[in-house]
C-alpha cells in the first residue's frame, strides 16, 4: 500500500484550503454574474477579449497562417507514426530489459512531482495550453469557422486557455480545413518547443574540463580535490568533459599515483596527486571456517562478519590467551592467486579490557612461515576500533606464497593479557584487488557549464529562467507528440479520422431543410450505421495506440516507484 509522505499531505491540505477559500470568495463577490463558473477545485472564465485577439491575429496574416497550419498537417501525421513506433519499442524494452529511463511517468501535481520543480512547471504549462488553444482558434477563423467562446480555466494546479469551436460549421468544411484545425494545436506546441530549445542552448555552453560536483569524505581524493573545482588535466592529458575524464581514469589501477591539474574557484591552477583507491562496495565473503586454537567461541557466525549489524562474533579467552584463525577460501571466486595485486581487510573489534600485549593479526606464509605478514597490531581495544590492513605486490610481497594448495588464506588472531577477557568482532570485510580491478577516486563529476551571452545578461535570474525554459521545451515536445496519438479525445484521433471522412456540407443542408419542412412531424429514430471497413481500420489503430499508451504507464507503475522517479529525473 502506498503511503503519502508528510510533505505531500501538507501540500494537498494547502491546496484544499486554497480552493475552499477561493470558492467562498467567488460566491461573496458573485463572480458568476461576470461569466465565471467556479466549482470545487476549478474555475472557468469566459471572455470576449480573447475572441477578439484570435480574430485579429487570423485576419492580419491569413496567408501565413494557412501555409503554417498546412505544414502542420504533415507534421501531425509524421509525429503520429513516430510516437506510435516509439511507444511500441518502449513497451517492448520495459518487458524485456526494463530501465528507469524507459518509464512513462504520468504527471500528477503533488504526487509524482512536488516541491520546487512543480513551481517551475506552472508557467510552462500555462504557455503550452494558451498557445495550443489560440492555434486552434486561428486555424478555425482563417477558414470561416466561428469561435463560439474562449477564456481561461484552472483545475487544481493546472491552468490555461480554451476555445470552443462551432463543430457543425467545422464538419461542413473541406478535409484539408479540418486537418489544419486539428493539427494546429500540436504543431504550435512543437514550434514553442523549438524556440525554447534555441533559448536553452544559447544560455549556457559546455566548457572544457570536468566539474567536481562532490568529493566523498572517505574516498582517496578527500583532502586533495575539492568540490566546485574543474579538472583540466590528468597526468598531463587534457580533459574535454566528464566522459573523457572517466575513460582516462579507467586506465589507472588501484594504488597508482594520479596527478590532477585543477582550476580552483578563485581561478588559480593547481597540481594535486591522488593515490587511486578501490571501490569498497565490492566486498567478498569467502569465510571458509573458524579454527579456535585457544579460547571459547561464545556466540556468532561467520556470516555476520560481512554485515554491519548487531550480531558480532564473540570469543572468550582461556587462561588469559585467545588464539583463532579465519580460513579465507577464494576458490569459489575463480581468482588465481597470481592475479592478485593486493588484499585489504577492514575490521571492527571490541574488547572488555585494554592493554593487550603482543596482540596481532597476521597472514600465514605457507612457503616460509618465518615470513608471516603482520597485517594488524592490536594494543588498545577497550572502546572498540575500526582498522584497515593490507598486503600488496607493490610493497614487494609475493601473494602466492600466502595461499595453500586449496587456494586458502589463513588469517591468525592472537590476543594476550594478564587476565581473562572477551573480544567481539563486529565486521571483517575482505577486498581482493586484481590486475583487472578498476581504480576508485570517490568523486562525482558533471559537465563544466559556462555562461553564454544570454545568461550573462539575465544575471542571477538565469538559472531560474533556464529551468523554466527547459521544462517548456520538454513539456511542449511531449504534449505535441502525445496529443497526436489516435486516441479519443486527443487531436490525433480527429486528424486520423479525417482520412476516412468527406465533407458533410450537402448532407447537413439536406437535413436542415428536412427538419424545417417536417418540424411538425415526429422524427423517426436514426438508423444504426453499418459497420464498415473504415471503422475496422479506425478502431484497430485506436486499439493499438491505447494498448501501447496504457501498457507503458501500467508497466512503469509496476516496475518502478513512479512517485519519486519523475522528480529524480527533473
Image: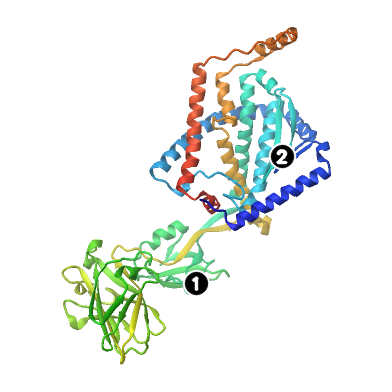
Q: How far from the left and from the top, in percent, is residue 87? A: 48, 37
- Disc 2 vs disc 1: Cβ atoms closer than 8 Å? no
Vertical order, 130 against 271 (above or below): above
Other-residue count near label 2 (Cα within 10 Å), few / some / many at <14 / 14–19 / ≥20: some
Q: Which residue: 49% across, 72% down?
A: 270
Q: Of the numbered discs in the image, which one, if any, rests on residue 153? A: 2
Question: How many discs appear?
Answer: 2
Which sits in the foreground, 268 or 505? 505
Is residue 64 visible in the rendered image? The answer is: no
Which one is nearer the viewer's eye here, 568 or 265? 568
Q: Would residue 306 be visible to someone looking at this image?
A: yes
Return the mark for residue 541. Answer: none
Position in image of residue 124 (x %, y %): 65, 45
Residue depicted at 65% across the width and 51% down the height: 12
Query: Where is residue 358 drawn, in percent x and y?
Result: 29, 89
- Residue at 69% in and 38% down: 130
- 3D distance between C-alphas at marks 2 and 1: 57 Å
Where residue 471 appears, x then y in whole percent? 60, 47
First reached walking from the N terminus: tag 2 or tag 1 = 2
Task: Using the image, determine if residue 405 lies above or below residue 421.
Answer: above
- The colour scheme of the drawn protein is rainbow
Q: Residue furthest front?
A: 298
Q: Quadrant of residue 97?
A: top left
Closer to us: 392 or 274: 392
Q: Report helix, strand or loop for mark 1.
A: strand
Q: Nearer the viewer, mark 2 or mark 1?
A: 2
In the picture, measured across the screen, residue 309 lies left or right of residue 419, that is: right
Q: Label 1 belongs to which residue?
A: 270
Amino acid at each position: 500500500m502506498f503511503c503519502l509522505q508528510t510533505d505531500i499531505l501538507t501540500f494537498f491540505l494547502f491546496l484544499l484550503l486554497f480552493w475552499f477559500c477561493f470558492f467562498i470568495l467567488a460566491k461573496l463577490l458573485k463572480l458568476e454574474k461576470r461569466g465565471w463558473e467556479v466549482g470545487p477545485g476549478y474555475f472557468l472564465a469566459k471572455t470576449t477579449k480573447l475572441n477578439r485577439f484570435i480574430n485579429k491575429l487570423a485576419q492580419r496574416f491569413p496567408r501565413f497562417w494557412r501555409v503554417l497550419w498546412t505544414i502542420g498537417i504533415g507534421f501531425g501525421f509524421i509525429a503520429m507514426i513516430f510516437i506510435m513506433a516509439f511507444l511500441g519499442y518502449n513497451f517492448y524494452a520495459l518487458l524485456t530489459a526494463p530501465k528507469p529511463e524507459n518509464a512513462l511517468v504520468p504527471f500528477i501535481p503533488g504526487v509524482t512531482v512536488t516541491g520546487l520543480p512543480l513551481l517551475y512547471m506552472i508557467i510552462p504549462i500555462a504557455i503550452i495550453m494558451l498557445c495550443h488553444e489560440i492555434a486552434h482558434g486561428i486555424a478555425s477563423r482563417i477558414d470561416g469557422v466561428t469561435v463560439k467562446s474562449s477564456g481561461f480555466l484552472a483545475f487544481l494546479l493546472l491552468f490555461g486557455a480554451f476555445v470552443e469551436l462551432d463543430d457543425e460549421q467545422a464538419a461542413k468544411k473541406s478535409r484539408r480545413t479540418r486537418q489544419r484545425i486539428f493539427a494546429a494545436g500540436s504543431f504550435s506546441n512543437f514550434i514553442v518547443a523549438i524556440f525554447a530549445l534555441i533559448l536553452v542552448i544559447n544560455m549556457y555552453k559546455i566548457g572544457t574540463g570536468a566539474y567536481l560536483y562532490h568529493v566523498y569524505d572517505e574516498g582517496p581524493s578527500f583532502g586533495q580535490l575539492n568540490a566546485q573545482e574543474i579538472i583540466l588535466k590528468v597526468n598531463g592529458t587534457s580533459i574535454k568533459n566528464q566522459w573523457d575524464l572517466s575513460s582516462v581514469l579507467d586506465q589507472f589501477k588501484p594504488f597508482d599515483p594520479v596527478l590532477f591539474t585543477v582550476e580552483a574557484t578563485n581561478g588559480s591552477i593547481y597540481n594535486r596527486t591522488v593515490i587511486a583507491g578501490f571501490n569498497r562496495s565490492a566486498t567478498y565473503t569467502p569465510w571458509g571456517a573458524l579454527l579456535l586454537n585457544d579460547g571459547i567461541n561464545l556466540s556468532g557466525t561467520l556470516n555476520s562478519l560481512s554485515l554491519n549489524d548487531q550480531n558480532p562474533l564473540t570469543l572468550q579467552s582461556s587462561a588469559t590467551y585467545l588464539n583463532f584463525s579465519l580460513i579465507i577460501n577464494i576458490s569459489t571466486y575463480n581468482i588465481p592467486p597470481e592475479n592478485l595485486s593486493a588484499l585489504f581487510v577492514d575490521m571492527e573489534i571490541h574488547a572488555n579490557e585494554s592493554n593487550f600485549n603482543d596482540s596481532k593479526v597476521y597472514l600465514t606464509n605457507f612457503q616460509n612461515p618465518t615470513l608471516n605478514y603482520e597485517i594488524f597490531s592490536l594494543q588498545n581495544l577497550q572502546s572498540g576500533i575500526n582498522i584497515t590492513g593490507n598486503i600488496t605486490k607493490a610493497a614487494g610481497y609475493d601473494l602466492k606464497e600466502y595461499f595453500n594448495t586449496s587456494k586458502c588464506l589463513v588469517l591468525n588472531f592472537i590476543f594476550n593479557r594478564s587476565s581473562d577477557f572477551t573480544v567481539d568482532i563486529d565486521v571483517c570485510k575482505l577486498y581482493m584487488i586484481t590486475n583487472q580491478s578498476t581504480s576508485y577516486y570517490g568523486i562525482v563529476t558533471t559537465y563544466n557549464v559556462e555562461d553564454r551571452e544570454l545568461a550573462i545578461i539575465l544575471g542571477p535570474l538565469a538559472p531560474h529562467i533556464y529551468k523554466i525554459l527547459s521544462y517548456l521545451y520538454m513539456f511542449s515536445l511531449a504534449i505535441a507528440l502525445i496529443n497526436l496519438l489516435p486516441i479519443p479525445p486527443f487531436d490525433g484521433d480527429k486528424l486520423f479520422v479525417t482520412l476516412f471522412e468527406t465533407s458533410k456540407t450537402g448532407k447537413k443542408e439536406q437535413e436542415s431543410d428536412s427538419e424545417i419542412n417536417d418540424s411538425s412531424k415526429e422524427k423517426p429514430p436514426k438508423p444504426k450505421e453499418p459497420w464498415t471497413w473504415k471503422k475496422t481500420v479506425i478502431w484497430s489503430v485506436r486499439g493499438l495506440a491505447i494498448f501501447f499508451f496504457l501498457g507503458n504507464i501500467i508497466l512503469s507503475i509496476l516496475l518502478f516507484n513512479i512517485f519519486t522517479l519523475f522528480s529524480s529525473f527533473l
